[in-house]
Image (cartoon, helix red, strand yellow):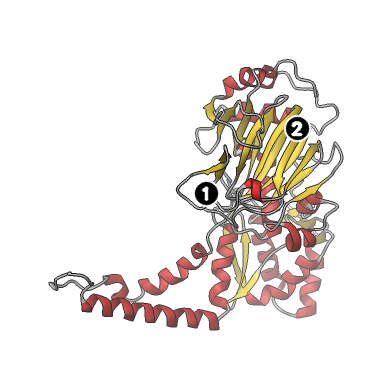
Amino acid sequence: MNLNDFNCLLGPTPLDDGGAAPAGEAPARQGDALASLIAPITPGAFVDQYFARTSLHVEGHPDKFAQIFSWEKLRLALARGRSLTDPRFNLMASYAGGERDGSSKSLFPCSIDETGNLLNKGATICITNIHMADPGLAQWAQAVRSQLNFSGTVGANCYISPEGGGLPMHYDRRVATSIQIAGSKRWLYSTKAAKPWPDNNAVFRDGRAEPADIDVGTLPPELEIHEVNLQAGDLLCLPAGAWHAAKGIGVSLAINLYFAPRNFYTLLAPVLHDFAAADGNWRGGPPAGLDPITGDIPDPSKTYIRERLTELRDQIDSILQSSDDIKLPWLHSLVSEPYTGWTPEAERALPGASANTRFIVALPPLRFVEANGKIVIPNDRGLLHMPADFAPVLKKIAAHRADFSVPEVLAWNQETGASPPQTIISHLQALFRGGLINMA
């Protein structure tokens, strides 16, 4: 798309996307969201060989991502963004140009009203968490997160770069997947991370890295740096900590689907907290005393700490012996804090349905775990608990690739003899209210 004046992105007139998907058409929230994104790489190869391990460049075709984003969807997102007050949705600009050795031209905040003029003057614009202003993009990102069973935060940033505009050499503390929507962008990137899952972002400038007071890992000159021009429909997925720089060749529009990790400790903390909260010795803390502190902590405090740590060791040994104790924290990690700005769908009202009404799994694969005598199913609002005797029927629903009717499900139930028909129907209603199955 040729843009003579970027202020057209702020106007009320729809943009000509050259045959792209209609602006109101959201990307399908289906089980093939991940597979379609990385094709022809298979999801299995992506997870086993590339994701968070090494960089991956996938060539596509110009319309591959037309359902995901476009110039017109950008215009609509900017319009919606005017009413967003959440600071996690924000805009930054830079006059840097993708320099290999860094640049002194840093990012600075800007407003939506300023974007057109800044782009006209050669600045790159980064719209952080643009999915907050695009419901279709938010649903698509949630589908990818679900299919990867990713326990961290997933979201989308948007980058608009005029000719020669971009960001200098840096790395991010999260997996960054650049999806080229329109135009072309030259990328310089390392195939490996300078530091696995770093705690901080880092920038490279004049032969040294910042922040200077932390270990940023291997510097760019010591790594193999690849160069590629991403065209519309191409994808570049970088592990957290991979150095990269990019600049527009002509006008570039790209989406960065990011995967920000959660420290594994956060999965275990609720379990350990419940253990400690049930014991008065833990709740009370170290004992008070009048012993002088001259070179070491008092013996009663030392004894107290050793006793608690011994109990903690025993508790961890107990958790290791019971798989159910680790199932629920992991499931909670899949649904809590799904990603910045995500608003779960409200609980649905039951539809008017007949024996001929067809249903389908809303977001394949349907995920559930059997734990503590219950079936636990993650959905957008948390965890749905059902009786364990529903497991045989739920497994058939999860494995069924086509749509189905209520009578068909009742027939599956007769094969197992698990529950009365009305009980099965009530379970199906709970799945529908929770957004786990849809009318086909």
Query: Disc 2 versus disc 1: distance between alpha carbons?
Result: 31 Å
* Label 1 neighbour load within 10 Å: few <14, some 14-19, many 20+: some
Kind of residue at badge 2 = Ser
The residue pinned by badge 2 equals: 70
Vertical placement of residue 293 versus 106, above or below: below
Q: Dot 2: few (<14), some (14–19), or many (≥20) neighbours within 10 Å?
A: many
The spot of residue 340 in percent (x, y) is: 56, 45
Q: Nearer the viewer, residue 129 or 362?
A: 129
Q: Quadrant of residue 274?
A: bottom left
Tell me if residue 97 comes above or below residue 213 in the rendering.
above
Q: Earlier in the sequence, mark 2 or mark 1?
A: 2
> Left or right of 140: which side holds 194?
left
- In the image, 348 versus 287, the foreground residue is 287
Above or below for 100 versus 177: above
Element type at mark 1: loop
Q: Residue at x 32, y 81 (%)?
A: 307
Labelled disc at residue 35: none
Q: Residue at 65% x, 33% y: name it.
A: 99
Camera sees residue 146: yes
Q: Name the quadrant containing residue 121.
A: top right
Count of numbered circles on the image: 2
Q: Which residue is mark 1?
A: 200
Task: Give the residue type that dot 1 points to.
Answer: Asn
Cβ atoms under marks 2 and 1 closer than 8 Å: no
| Quadrant in which the N terminus is drawn | top right
Residue at 56 percent of width and 30 percent of height: 92
Please report the residue visible at 55 percent of the width from the left and 46 percent of the height from the top.
201
- The picture places residue 292, in percent across and down from the top left corner, at 14, 71
Q: Secondary structure at mark 2?
A: loop
